[in-house]
Amino acid sequence: MSADAPATAARKTAPAWQLVANAVGGPAAIAGKLRRLARTLRLWIDPAEVRGRLAELERKGFIQRRPSRWQIAFGGIDMLRFVIEPAARDYYEQQGISFGFHQLLRVLDDPVSMVDPTGFLSERDTIIGHVMQVVHLNPVYDLQLLQMFPDGLEELERQVAQMVAGTHPRHRTIGAIVEDPTYHARLLEYVCRYQADPDTPPLVRSEQTLRDDPAFAAAERTFATLPGFIDYCNRLPDGFGTLLRRARSVRRFPVELATR
């Protein structure tokens, strides 16, 4: 947001109908969402593209051994159910925000961000939009993931700067979702620090009560970084049937697979 942004975000003050209308946007915004969705769905049937992205991350040191596509898919399901969803429910309850309505606004703003929780099948700008759309538990995974693209971090910085200045093309639709008016300024500062030093302390969301649960704390630690997620995927069994049976039977994060 700009330097003179209101102390309270529109997400907490505007009526529901206005938030929905802003999240949907006009004809140009809708057309852009449909194009991004179509391109993402095409990636699902293009394993060569995913292999190329994994190879780039491997070259940059984020991946030591490539998991299979099914291991990545079910690892993403575990990241979603053991960290992303419970952390979001906990956080939005503290913020006095309906979790269900907030997810609806996210889908209306960009349906692609809900289709691909791992980000490996998403375009650069979809990942950037997701980072700007959600006050992240920890955005370092996404910053590492953006390095699949030659200009990922530079473009993230440019677009976040546009959000801060109020000039980004999606400023209105993203503004209907983000509940913290200081988020984009803090994110921009972190992105700049990260590019100068990738080991800089991450922008961790502090408003969480779940960290007292050892299983959640272990899951958060594991999925916070791209290497942690990849290592977890590599520890999973291979084969769709085995992974499906495991997903049905495992209801709590398996701490024995956690990053130490």
Image (spheres, rainbow, N blue to C red):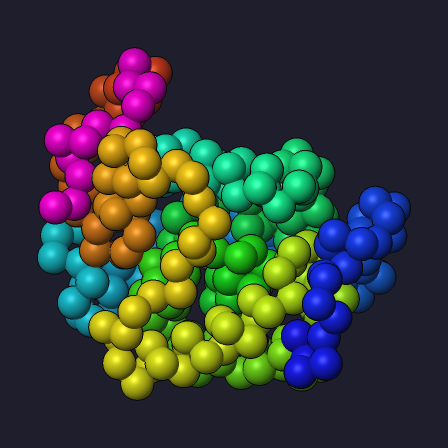
- Answer with the quarter of the image where residue 215 lies: top left
Q: Main secondary structure of the magenta part?
A: loop
Q: As rendered, which of 89 and 67 lies closer to the eye? A: 89
Determine if residue 48 is in view.
no
Instruction: Find out whether residue 256 is within the magenta segment.
Output: yes
Q: Give percent across and percent down for residue 107.
A: 66, 45
User: Would residue 115 appear left or right of 231 to someone viewing this image?
Assistant: right
Where's residue 27, x and y in %?
A: 84, 61
State the image coordinates of residue 117 (x, y, percent, origin top left): 45, 45
Q: In the rendered view, does 149 fall on the left or right side of 60?
A: right
- The residue positioned 55% from the left and 76% from the top of the image is 185
Residue depicted at x 25% and y 68%: 56
Please give the name of the residue rendered at 68% of the width and 62% of the height, measured from the top-left corner. 174
In the rendering, at what x and y percent does residue 146 appear? 38, 67
Instruction: Depth check: give the residue in front, 105 or 185.
Output: 185
Horizontal side, residue 247 vs residue 61: left or right: right
Q: Is residue 41 above or below residue 257?
A: below
Q: Residue at x 72, y 61 (%)?
A: 9
> From which residue to which does the magenta span run?
249-260
